[in-house]
Amino acid sequence: MIKRIVIGLAALAAGTGVGIGGAYAARQFLPQAMPDLGPTEVETEFVPTGTILAPLTFPDGRLSGYVSFECQVEVAKGKAEDVTGQLPLLLNAVNMRTYRTPLASGPDGLIPGVEAFRRVVMDAAVEVYGKDLVRRVVVTQAAPV
């Protein structure tokens, strides 16, 4: 009796594994067979933020200098007016984060950490505009002042 139950459970587990594996393989290797399940393409546009002046700080909190960044925020098409209208709030949120985040790199601390600044602007943009509106942030220029 117990042998029949164990064999039945083993067949059920094997069938589940084969079914899941087949579905995964079909999804990976035959996406044209399931076009409605693929990711939807959303048209986006970039909104320039203008020049942002930020302090370059070392990890211990010392000021190294200042840097000017230019970046753009990628949003869904048609939402550029909303983003542009709240741009001063974004710049304030960026300013409140940059003095706490170590952005200086290099031996003399005059090289700005672009990836760290991108994270700072992305966090500020998500706070100001919401997670659904902002796709990504692109730093287009960074120069020490």
Image: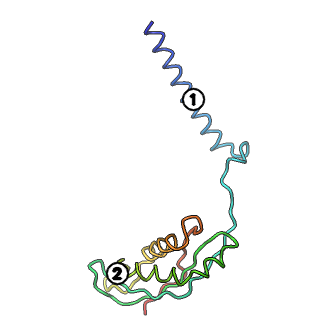
Dot 2: element: loop
Q: For residue 54, which quarter of the picture?
A: bottom left
- Residue sitting at 70 percent across and 73 percent down? 78
- Left or right relative to 114: residue 20: right
Direction bottom: furthest residue: 145
What residue is shown with label 2?
Answer: 106
Image position, residue 65 (x, y; %): 36, 90
How dense is the environment of label 1, judged by Cα within 10 Å: few (below 14), some, or many (20 and up)? few
**Residue type indicated by callout 2:** Gly
Image position, residue 60 (x, y; %): 26, 79
- Left or right relative to 62: residue 45: right
What residue is shown with label 1?
Answer: 18
Image position, residue 93 (x, y; %): 46, 79
95 vs 139, nearest the viewer? 95
Above or below: residue 128 compared with residue 54: above
**Residue type indicated by callout 1:** Val
Earlier in the chain: of badge 1 and badge 2, it is 1
143 vs 69, nearest the viewer? 69
- The quadrant of the image that shows the N terminus is top left
